[in-house]
Amino acid sequence: MKLGLVGLTHSGKTTLFNALTGLSAETGYYQKNNEPNIAITEIRDERVTNLSKLYEPQKTIYSSLEILDFPADEEEKKKQFNGPQLKILDAFAVVLRNFSDPILDQSLGTPDPLKDLEDIEIEMILSDLQIAEKRLEKVQLGFKRGVKTAETLFEEKVLLRIVESLQNEKPIRGLELAPDEEKTIRGFQLLTQKPMMVLVNSGEINYLKNEELLDKIRQKGYIAEDFLGRFEMELIGLDEEDKQLFMEDMGIVSSARDRVISLAYRLLGYVNFFTVGKGEVRAWAITAGTNAQNAAGVIHSDLQRGFIRAECFSYDDIMEYGSEKVLREKGKFRLEGKNYLVNDGDILSIRFSV
């Protein structure tokens, strides 16, 4: 799972990046090569920990979240939304400045999160519009040259719909695209088609006092949450006991990392299934509603191609009964076909032949 942090200059993206990853990247920076900070953090699902204690495998592998923190520069902010690395992201997290600072207030004005969000939306829309119009022009030029097929006619129809939406300053994610329409534009990796959530980066004075602001952001269709970026970054160097005390004092219920992971799973509609054994216990993230054959493909393409059956039981059952032998005796062990929809907490073993 790849999550990109984007935002205007001095919004606190890198501060939040440090809070999420435990790293100490320089804050307030702008790199001329426009390269992001990148970190991979484990998603510490306690179910994986418990399964590892039960099976005692050689390796335990948690799901992971790759976080990319993209540099921003007010004079060249368009660069932030044109890089190739944005195309490979699964989702965006927009960081909005909602804290006062004497120097920043003097140079940038007082915080205006809603205006900042609108500015970012427009930049993404303009980036997508440029791509869509260029492709539409190429398709229509082909028509003039006598190159007209059912596929290109369908692509033109989809592109015309997308261009109209973007010209009306509406992101593509708001369109109800049919599967064949989505497939037609998938290769463009348009930014406003990707899921997006909003992280409001507040100060100690106004943290947890932003329900009106959050409601307005949510009314635009986004998942939004309040964060205390600088404070949460400063928690990194504390021991666990002191960290919990300070978090409780500020009303922070869980770490920034855990909250962002929870938001990302909710945004993308992800669930986890597991594979277990003496060699390895591992978590795999998939979209809710994924069938067993496609879930097998997440493990390895050969398993999807040669899929026969999935041996399946649930995490709750194995933790209750303690062994696969007892599960079989209790009738909790199942064989499922390729169209079985994998549930959160399922444990799968794939039978296949290639």
Image: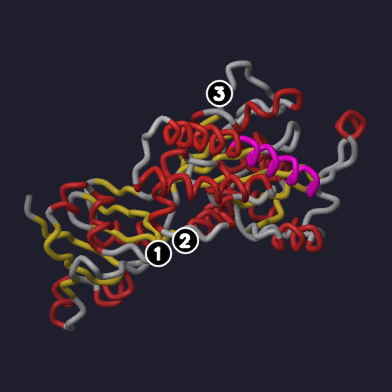
Asked whether the beta carbons under mark 1 and mark 3 sit within 8 Å of each other, the answer is no
User: What type is the residue that disc 1 sits on?
Assistant: Ala
Q: Position of residue 273 (x, y in %)?
A: 32, 61
Q: Image height check: is 332 above or below 275?
A: below
Mark 2–mark 3 Cα distance, whole angstroms, equals 29 Å
User: How many residues crowd around disc 1 within 10 Å: few (fewer than 14), some, or many (20 or more)?
Assistant: some
Q: Residue furthest bottom?
A: 330
Instruction: Give the quadrant of residue 334.
Output: bottom left
- N-terminal-most mark, 1 or 2: 2
Q: Give the residue at mark 3.
A: 35
The question of residue 248 being in magenta is answered with no
Mark 1–mark 3 Cα distance, whole angstroms, equals 33 Å
Residue 139 in view in this figure: yes
Kindly state the secondary structure of the residue where label 3 is placed.
loop
- The tag on residue 269 is 2
Asked whether the beta carbons under mark 1 and mark 2 sit within 8 Å of each other, the answer is yes
User: How many residues crowd around disc 3 within 10 Å: few (fewer than 14), some, or many (20 or more)?
Assistant: some
Residue 176 in the figure: left or right of residue 111: left
The question of residue 120 being in magenta is answered with yes
The span shown in magenta is 113-127
- The tag on residue 288 is 1
Kindly state the secondary structure of the residue where label 2 is placed.
loop
Q: Position of residue 58 (x, y in %)?
A: 22, 47
